[in-house]
């Protein structure tokens, strides 16, 4: 009862302060967005950044400046408040080698992260875990985390032996308490991803030393940004996103000044390099801003890994004839890398011909994956609307 009372007092305090609190607008002169550089300028910028360090100590000094710049750009601190998650889990379904549950928890008081939890049916003393993010792909009858390719990825990883949590970007799916184009979307999604790691840590059977994250496009941004900010991520696979010249086309990727401040300048290649020396696979293609990965982005990141003596921990999969997606060939590459570094079983999704085969996956209807519906309504105290969410994050971060 004491916890509930304190919780209500916090919400009432936020409401009482609503006339005084407002979202802080970023210094737009510091933003690096979209195709901020040409391809040539992006490559030249990396050469300039590389000249600022020459050994592990000097790289780690630069890495610290970049990481601090991200936190300051988000207007957060690494020790931001962690309030009770209060998880909601329901509607468990059992399929061929895996189960699915609908999940929500509060990353901030009254602000819900929504998603689906996939678990292996095969029992083990402990399991690795994987966060599965999504991007801005065109919607149809499925959306966000309920897309067919997302379901296939999560189900396959679960059958391979991982506990997988797929969650919505803000403003997508069940996470509709604010618009996706909210000016603080990048901070909101960073908070949500860090709290998603907190949620995985509450699951007793999760091996906390074996947690990975993967996603494509905007989900790729979430992947490398979370990995940069939180060393609890052991393995990462950012897909079709790491680029020297492209900084993300949405406010949820570059709407806050994480790439530049009055004290630093960087790009997404260096932010991805903050994963070192932890295992990371870059997946790229020939039809978007990752077309130069083999010649530009990967060599730069590999050089950082070499400073740690861990060049074998970073790799790339380049598909020059493919485009911007998380299609089957990209998923196959991710499966193999995650299996190797998280101790998963590829045999669980391999057919008699030695090929990865996802036909066992049951693609569920969008509505079945919903967390909040008539039978399971969102709690009445939920914060709703862009202004209310702005007030919440402004209060919450202090």
Image (cartoon, helix red, strand yellow):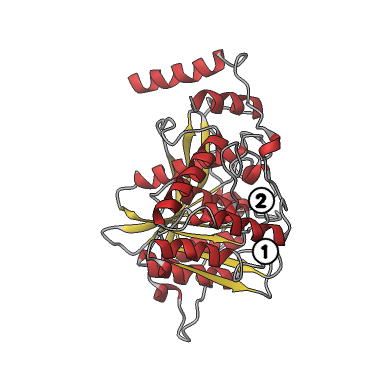
Residue ranking furthest to the bottom: 353
The location of residue 269, given as percent across then percent down, is 57, 56
Which quarter of the rendered picture does the N terminus lie within? top left
Please determine whether, in this image, residue 357 is positioned above or below residue 37. Answer: below
The location of residue 166, given as percent across then percent down, is 51, 52
Around disc 1, counting alpha carbons within 10 Å, would you say few (fewer than 14), some (14 to 19), or many (20 or more)? some
Q: Is residue 115 visible?
A: yes
Quarter residue 9 falls in: top left
Around disc 2, counting alpha carbons within 10 Å, would you say few (fewer than 14), some (14 to 19), or many (20 or more)? many
* Disc 2 to disc 1, C-alpha distance: 13 Å
Residue ranking furthest to the left: 125
Q: How many marks?
A: 2
Please determine whether, in this image, residue 333 is positioned above or below residue 385. Answer: below
Which residue is located at x 44 percent, y 32 percent?
80
Which residue is located at x 61 percent, y 24 percent?
388
Nearer-the-camera pick, 361 or 169 = 169
Q: Is residue 167 left or right of residue 33?
A: left
Residue at label 1? 324
Please determine whether, in this image, residue 54 is positioned above or below residue 256. Answer: below
* Element under disc 1: loop
For marks 2 and 1, give the one nearer the viewer: 2
Please determine whether, in this image, residue 172 is positioned above or below residue 339. Answer: above
* Element under disc 2: loop
The location of residue 318, given as percent across then percent down, is 59, 72
Q: Is residue 240 left or right of residue 84?
A: right
Task: Give whichever of discs 2 and 1 has the lower sequence position.
Answer: 2
Circle 2/circle 1 CB separation < 8 Å: no
Which residue is located at x 52 percent, y 71 percent?
333
Which residue is located at x 72 percent, y 50 percent?
36
Label disc, if present, on residue 248 of the rendered structure: 2
């Amino acid at each position: 009862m004491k916890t509930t009372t304190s919780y209500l007092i916090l919400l009432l305090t936020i409401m009482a302060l609503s006339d005084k609190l407002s979202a802080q607008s970023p210094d737009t002169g510091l933003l690096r967005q979209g195709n901020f550089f040409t391809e040539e300028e992006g490559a030249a910028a990396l050469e300039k950044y590389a000249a600022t360090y020459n050994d592990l100590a000097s790289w780690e000094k630069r890495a610290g400046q970049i990481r601090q710049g991200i936190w300051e750009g988000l207007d957060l601190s690494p020790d931001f408040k962690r309030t009770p998650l209060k998880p909601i889990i329901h509607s468990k379904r059992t399929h061929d080698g895996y189960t699915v549950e609908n999940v929500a928890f509060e990353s901030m008081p009254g602000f819900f992260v929504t998603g689906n939890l996939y678990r292996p049916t095969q029992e083990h003393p402990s399991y690795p875990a994987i966060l599965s993010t999504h991007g801005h792909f065109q919607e149809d009858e499925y959306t966000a985390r309920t897309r067919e390719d997302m379901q296939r990825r999560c189900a396959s990883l679960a059958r391979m032996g991982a506990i997988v949590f797929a969650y919505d970007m803000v403003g997508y799916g069940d996470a509709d308490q604010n618009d996706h184009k909210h000016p603080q979307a990048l901070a909101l999604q960073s908070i949500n991803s860090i709290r998603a790691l907190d949620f995985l840590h509450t699951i007793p059977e999760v091996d906390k030393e074996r947690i990975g994250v993967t996603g494509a496009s905007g989900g790729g941004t979430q992947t490398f940004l979370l990995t940069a900010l939180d060393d609890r991520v052991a393995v990462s696979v950012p897909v079709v996103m790491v680029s020297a010249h492209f900084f993300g086309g949405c406010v949820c990727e570059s709407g806050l000044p994480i790439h530049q401040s009055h004290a630093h300048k960087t790009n997404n290649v260096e932010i991805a390099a903050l994963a070192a020396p932890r295992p990371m696979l870059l997946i790229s293609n020939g039809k978007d801003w990752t077309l130069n990965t083999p010649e530009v982005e990967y060599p730069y990141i590999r050089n950082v890994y070499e400073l740690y003596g861990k060049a074998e921990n970073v790799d790339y999969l380049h598909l020059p004839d493919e485009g911007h997606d998380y299609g089957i060939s990209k998923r196959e590459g991710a499966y193999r890398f995650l299996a190797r570094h998280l101790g998963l079983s590829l045999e669980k999704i391999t057919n008699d011909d030695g090929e990865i085969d996802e036909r066992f996956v049951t693609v569920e209807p969008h509505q079945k994956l919903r967390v909040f519906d008539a039978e399971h309504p969102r709690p009445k105290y939920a914060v709703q609307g862009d202004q209310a969410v702005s007030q919440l994050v402004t209060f919450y971060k202090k």
